[in-house]
Image (cartoon, rainbow, N blue to C red):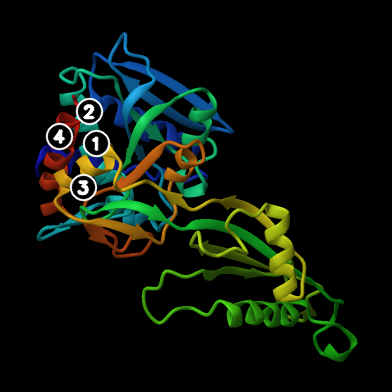
């Protein structure tokens, strides 16, 4: 096992999900240890989510480049936190999203930071999977700034200069409770809710293939019932909506406006829990052009949101650039180990190319 593989395996073995604060602290400390001594480590914490910013002593920023990595993962059964190798693939929760990239970014920072004639930082956060408000966004609120940011989310060695916005919302239907043997005496809120979800999916059907369009994922349907023989009086649906900047019903709208839009379609009250704008970085900008040249591939649009949107909101160009793999958030998540060296070398070439 190579040094990179061992470090990835060490990170994957930590179940760093949002509901495990001790694991979040552990994985952050482990990544900081991987960076090695000799760096100033600024620690942050917001709502129980720790993060850190590493930079060479005496160069506190603003930075020319920030390398950003998140160390948190989505929940998984225990066996997915035991990494396993099969050929050129390393399987496990977080291998692709995005602990492998975190290891390479940390290694590049460790070996390059002192050499570069400009200020650079490594940003490590533990809350990207739940929105990034307490990691990247919190650090930005504390004054952290850069001219350009590379976020190591998975991209198969492509440079992502545009990604969709994200809306996380809930639909809530109410009815009237009754004994299940006499359903005509009640009003089943869950049936009302499924009809409301159907109306929303009629407007935004699930695409048959990749499409640069607004998509709606129904993540959860629930009622407060604890018995089979009860007509539910309330039901809730969790929605994850991804939208391109051309969708005027979401882009540029406030949370209240989006909630009103969803209510109008679904016919039941909607509440927006989180709303993040689309992200865009100018592919013709000097930093993006340099990274595209180092990667040797054209720009890419990505359906998933990332912490890049927090930088975009402040007018700072941020791109996504990461290794290859597949299956993120699923049971067969893996990183393609053959992409780690090209990923490393492209980052090194890029950092040296913008030294002028």
**Label disc, if present, on residue 292 of the rendered structure:** 3
First reached walking from the N terminus: tag 2 or tag 4: 2
Which is more toward the observer, 106 or 186? Answer: 106
First reached walking from the N terminus: tag 1 or tag 3: 1
For the residues labelled 3 and 4, the Cα–Cα distance comes to 13 Å
Badge 4, how many Cα within 10 Å: few under 14, some, many 20+?
some
Task: Please state which of the two labelled residues, at mark 2 or mark 4, is closer to the viewer.
Answer: 4
Determine whether label 1 and label 3 are within 8 Å by CB.
no
Badge 1, how many Cα within 10 Å: few under 14, some, many 20+?
many
* Residue behind mark 2: 109
Determine whether label 2 and label 1 are within 8 Å by CB.
yes
Seen as rendered, the residue at the extreme right is: 185
Determine whether label 3 and label 4 are within 8 Å by CB.
no
Q: Position of residue 243 (x, y in %)?
A: 51, 63
Which is more toward the observer, 287 or 218? Answer: 287
Which is more toward the observer, 124 or 180? Answer: 124
For the residues labelled 2 and 4, the Cα–Cα distance comes to 9 Å
* Residue behind mark 1: 105
Query: Where on the picture, by quarter, is residue 265?
Result: bottom right
**Label disc, if present, on residue 348 of the rendered structure:** 4
Determine whether label 2 and label 4 are within 8 Å by CB.
no
Badge 2, how many Cα within 10 Å: few under 14, some, many 20+?
many
């Amino acid at each position: 096992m190579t040094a990179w593989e061992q470090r990835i395996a060490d990170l994957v073995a930590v179940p760093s999900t949002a509901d495990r604060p001790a694991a979040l602290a552990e994985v952050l400390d482990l990544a900081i240890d991987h960076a090695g001594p000799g760096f100033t480590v600024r620690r942050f914490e917001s709502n129980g989510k720790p993060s850190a910013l590493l930079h060479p002593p005496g160069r506190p920023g603003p930075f020319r480049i920030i390398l950003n990595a998140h160390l948190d993962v989505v929940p998984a059964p225990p066996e997915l936190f035991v990494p396993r190798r099969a050929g050129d693939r390393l399987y496990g929760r977080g291998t692709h999203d995005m602990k492998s990239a975190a290891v390479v970014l940390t290694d590049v920072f460790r070996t390059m930071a002192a050499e570069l004639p400009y200020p650079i930082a490594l940003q490590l956060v533990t809350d990207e999977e739940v929105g990034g408000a307490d990691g990247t966004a919190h650090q930005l609120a504390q004054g952290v700034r850069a001219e350009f940011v590379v976020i190591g989310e998975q991209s198969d060695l492509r440079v992502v200069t545009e990604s969709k916005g994200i809306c996380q919302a809930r639909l809530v239907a109410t009815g009237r409770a009754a004994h299940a043997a006499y359903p005509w005496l009640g009003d089943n809120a869950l049936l009302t809710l499924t009809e409301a979800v159907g109306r929303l999916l009629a407007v935004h059907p699930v695409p048959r293939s990749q499409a640069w369009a607004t998509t709606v994922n129904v993540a959860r349907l629930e009622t407060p019932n604890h018995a089979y023989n009860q007509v539910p009086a309330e039901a809730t649906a969790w929605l994850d909506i991804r939208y391109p900047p051309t969708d005027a019903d979401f882009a540029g709208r406030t949370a209240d406006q989006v909630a009103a839009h969803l209510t109008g379609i679904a016919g039941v009250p909607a509440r927006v829990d989180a709303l993040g704008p689309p992200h865009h970085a100018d592919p013709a900008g000097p930093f993006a052009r340099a990274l595209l040249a180092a990667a040797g591939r054209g720009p890419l649009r990505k359906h998933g949101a990332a912490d890049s949107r927090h930088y975009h909101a402040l007018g700072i160009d941020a791109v996504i650039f990461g290794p290859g793999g597949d299956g993120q958030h699923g049971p067969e998540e893996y990183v393609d180990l053959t992409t780690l060296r090209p990923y490393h070398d492209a980052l090194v070439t890029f950092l040296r190319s913008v030294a002028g």
